[in-house]
Amino acid sequence: MKKSALVLALIGAASAGAASAEDFTFTVPVAVSLLPPSITSMDIACGVITDAAHGGRLIGHATVTEPITGGGFSGDVVVAFNATLPEERALAASYNCEINRFVAPYGTAGGGARVYYPGNATTRPELFFPLATGAAFVTSTGYLPLH
């Protein structure tokens, strides 16, 4: 019998703040569970874009790698970064935070890793670990306004 994995990744309520020296700081609540035991980390990425009048351009982004043990993780992940060009920080209009990959090492010294991209869960399921039928799987906030 093939074991299915239920993945629940709740990413929401991210907020920009001035708690540090970075231009943008997002606290992203993340919960994943029942992942294959081989998964040892995930990457959470956030980016900020301008409004349409300024071309909807990406003006800053960062990725944080968070370890996963025992098939799950639950907690807040802080992603902080500066605008690529300091003069553009005031143009920030919206943001997106997402889990953009899960990693499972191959297990041999220097053997690399198997990388799973959440976008493949629906578009290329043969390239992703199995999900239980109907499993809730949210990996992105979508673009949300900053103000």
Image (cartoon, rainbow, N blue to C red):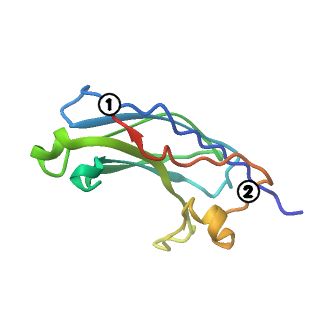
The residue nearer to you, when weighing 29 against 122, is: 122
Instruction: Pinpoint residue 84: horizontal percent, then vertical percent.
Output: 18, 52
Inspect the image, locate mark 2, and give the three-letter code of the amino acid beneath it: Leu
Decide if residue 74 is on the left or right side of residue 35. Answer: left
- Label 2 vs label 1, nearer the camera: 1
Q: Which residue is mark 1?
A: 147
Q: Quadrant of the C terminus?
A: top left
Q: Find the residue positioned furthest to the top.
A: 19
Decide if residue 4 is on the left or right side of residue 54. Answer: right
Determine the residue positioned at 57% across, 69% down.
Answer: 106
The residue nearer to you, when weighing 147 against 106, is: 147
Looking at the image, residue 12 lies above or below residue 54: above
Q: Which dot marks residue 117?
A: none
Looking at the image, residue 11 lies above or below residue 106: above
Determine the residue positioned at 60% across, 47% down.
Answer: 138
Label located before the other in sequence (2 or 1): 2
Looking at the image, residue 56 lies above or below residue 13: below
The residue nearer to you, when weighing 34 against 23, is: 23
Q: Quadrant of the N terminus?
A: bottom right
Inspect the image, locate mark 1, and give the three-letter code of the amino acid beneath it: His
Q: Secondary structure at mark 1?
A: loop
Q: Which residue is mark 2?
A: 131
Q: Secondary structure at mark 2?
A: loop
Instruction: Pinpoint residue 76: horizontal percent, then vertical percent.
Output: 47, 32
Residue 81 can be seen, yes or no: no
Instruction: Pinpoint residue 124: horizontal percent, then vertical percent.
Output: 64, 71
Determine the residue positioned at 70% across, 45% down.
Answer: 136
The residue nearer to you, when weighing 50 against 102, is: 50
